[in-house]
Image (cartoon, rainbow, N blue to C red):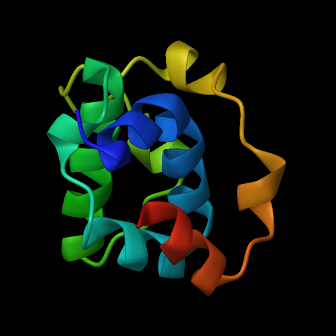
């Protein structure tokens, strides 16, 4: 495993929550992260759905990601239990990009 893959396995849910909250973080992350970098299937599905919604110009917040009208194996109760990380909640884009690197 690469160092990036190890960090994504450790911080995957926090990365996803931060990207849902701030579009500039998704922009930085999507250039470096692939779905298979996330360890869990739910995380991979959330990542893919975020990218799809972003490409379509739609919102990709928690409500949109967990919309039950989509059949993509995203369990809203699982996502609701994810814990954001304080160091991602108010970080500068440079800090986040460094973390992705």
At 40% from the left edge and 77% from the top edge, which residue is drawn?
28
At 60% from the left edge and 85% from the top edge, which residue is drawn?
94
At 38% from the left edge and 67% from the top edge, which residue is drawn?
29
Whether residue 74 is situated above or below residue 27 in the rendered picture: above
Q: Position of residue 69 (x, y in %)?
A: 28, 32
Q: Position of residue 10 (x, y in %)?
A: 51, 30
Q: Position of residue 44 (x, y in %)?
A: 26, 34
| 99 vs 82, nearest the viewer | 99
Q: Quadrant of residue 84?
A: top right
In the rendered view, does 32 fall on the left or right side of 20?
left
Is residue 2 among what the camera can see? yes
Looking at the rendered image, the quarter that the N terminus falls into is top left
- Number of labels in the image equals 0
At 18% from the left edge and 26% from the top edge, which residue is drawn?
71
Looking at the rendered image, the quarter that the C terminus falls into is bottom left
In the rendered view, does 48 fall on the left or right side of 42?
left
| 79 vs 69, nearest the viewer | 79
Whether residue 32 is situated above or below residue 57 in the rendered picture: above
């Amino acid at each position: 495993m690469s160092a990036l893959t190890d960090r994504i396995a450790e911080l995957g849910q926090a990365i996803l929550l931060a990207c849902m909250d701030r579009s500039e973080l998704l922009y930085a992350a999507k250039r470096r992260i692939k779905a298979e970098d996330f360890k869990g299937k739910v995380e991979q599905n959330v990542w893919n759905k975020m990218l799809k919604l972003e490409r379509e110009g739609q919102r990709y917040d928690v409500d949109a990601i967990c919309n039950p009208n989509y059949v993509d194996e995203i369990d809203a109760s699982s996502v609701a239990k994810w814990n954001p990380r304080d160091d991602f909640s108010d970080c500068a884009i440079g800090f986040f990009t460094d973390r992705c690197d």
